[in-house]
Image (cartoon, grey):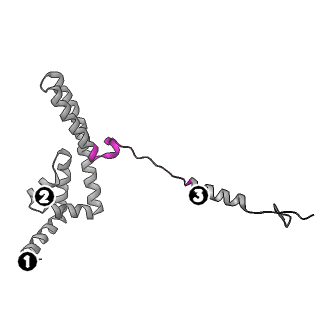
Amino acid sequence: MGIIKRQRHEAWRVKFETPAFWEQFFDRVPIGLTMKDYSKAQGVGYNAMHWYVESNPDIRARYDQALKARALEKVESIDEDVRQVISGEMDANCARVVIDAKKWTAGKMDRQRWGDSKQVHLEVTDLSKMHLEAMKALSEPVVIEGELSGEGDDD
């Protein structure tokens, strides 16, 4: 890595380790600030910032919370869109597109609350294995009081 690149990365690391950097970011994410816009405004690399978020569990948890807050803001703003349609300020077809986009985005930012898919716990039982074990048990000779049963008796 070249000297200039190393100096740039060191300057970014210093910013990333400053609590005010993250406080400012997390305060603005719920109102629409993206990581890309913030990294550009702060003069840090987007990929470096993304890597830092992903590699720090505390920062990642706060970012997830901020995204969930933004998802809630999008869902709550749908009421304003409906009001605009009712008052004639917005065309109904245009509102449909806007509302669908907000619902889709909210679903991606907070899948548990607003996502379309539900998580289902599914347990699969291998019936063929159970069948083979049952057949094996049935084919084993039965011993009664020390004598072999099921074999031909020679009387």
Residue at the (21%, 39%) spot, across then down = 101
Q: Main secondary structure of the magenta part?
A: loop
Q: Residues within 10 Å of mark 3 (few under 14, many from 20)?
A: few
Mark 3 touching mark 1, by CB under 8 A?
Answer: no
Q: Identity of the amino acid at label 1?
A: Ile
What mark, if any, has residue 3 been given in the picture?
Answer: 1
Lower sequence index among marks 2 and 3: 2
Lower sequence index among marks 3 and 1: 1
What mark, if any, has residue 129 been given in the picture?
Answer: 3
Q: CA distance from mark 3 to mark 1?
A: 63 Å
Q: Identity of the amino acid at label 2?
A: Ser
Q: Nearer the viewer, residue 23 or 39?
A: 39
**Residue at the extreme left of the image, as rendered:** 4
**Residue at the extreme right of the image, as rendered:** 155
Mark 2 touching mark 3, by CB under 8 A?
Answer: no
Does the magenta segment cover residue 108? yes
Residue 133 lies in what quarter of the image?
Answer: bottom right
Q: Residues within 10 Å of mark 1 (few under 14, many from 20)?
A: few
Q: Decide if residue 153 is on the left or right side of residue 52.
A: right
